[in-house]
Image (cartoon, grey):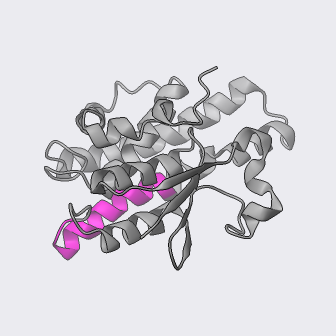
Amino acid sequence: MSLTLHGYWRSTTAYRVRIALALKGVAYERVAHDLRTGAQREPEYRTLNPQGLVPTLETDDAVLTQSPAILEWIDEVYPDPPLLPVGANDRAIVRAIAATIACDIHPVNNLRILNALRTEFGADEAAVNRWIVRWIGDGFAALETLIARHGDGFAFGPTPTIADCHLVPQVYSAERFAVDLSPYPHLMSAADKARALPAFAAAHPDRQPDADRA
């Protein structure tokens, strides 16, 4: 099967998908859309993704959007190694850890939200940074408890799951915005263990062909 991933080097949602594909050893083509210039809103791209967001994954017979759905599709189509545990309770916990990031932390810190704070609500950069720190802090405090309870090296258990696919990009974002991560030792231990794996390292934003470190 041929796969094409539409993304952006710094997008944490695209980062999640890159991690999962790397963990599975799945090859894919890349198409970059520079979010800073609004390339994701171009009409041609909106025919693929009506929201005008990244990532989008094109397969031989489908166009997939929303990174949580894409991650589950990847795990179903390429089942080795599994990114969800076997038991129903454990799978629900992993999904809850992932959803804490995908539903409660990331959306309110998405670029379009931050730009709206600046342009529509008159927030200066100090206010925007306080906003970012607040919502990452609230989410990470909950995750710290969950990872302390369920982690065993990784965010859940002794092997990477979709929870880690979400966690590592969110930690990258937190570090980018200079969030104090010292209150979250279990969370950071899990993130650091995951980041040491070759698949996570290969998916890092700085290692993407469209990376702009300026």
Location of the C terminus by quadrant is top right
Location of the N terminus by quadrant is bottom left
Query: 20 or 110: nearer the eye?
Result: 20
The residue most toward the top is 214
**160 to 94, vertically: above or below:** above
* Residue drawn 50% across the image and 71% down it: 59
Which contiguous range is marked in magenta? 85-102
Our reading of the magenta stretch's main secondary structure is: helix
User: Is residue 114 visible in this depiction of the protein?
Assistant: no
Residue 40 percent across, percent down from the top left = 73, 53
Q: Describe residue 72's horizontal placement relative to residue 120 as left or right.
A: left
Query: 106 or 30: nearer the eye?
Result: 30
Residue 91 lies in magenta, yes or no? yes
**102 to 90, vertically: above or below:** above
Q: Describe residue 98's horizontal placement relative to residue 53 as left or right.
A: left
Residue 177 percent across, percent down from the top left = 55, 27
Residue 80 lies in magenta, yes or no? no
* Residue drawn 34% across the image and 35% down it: 201
Residue 143 percent across, percent down from the top left = 34, 47
Residue 34 percent across, percent down from the top left = 70, 42
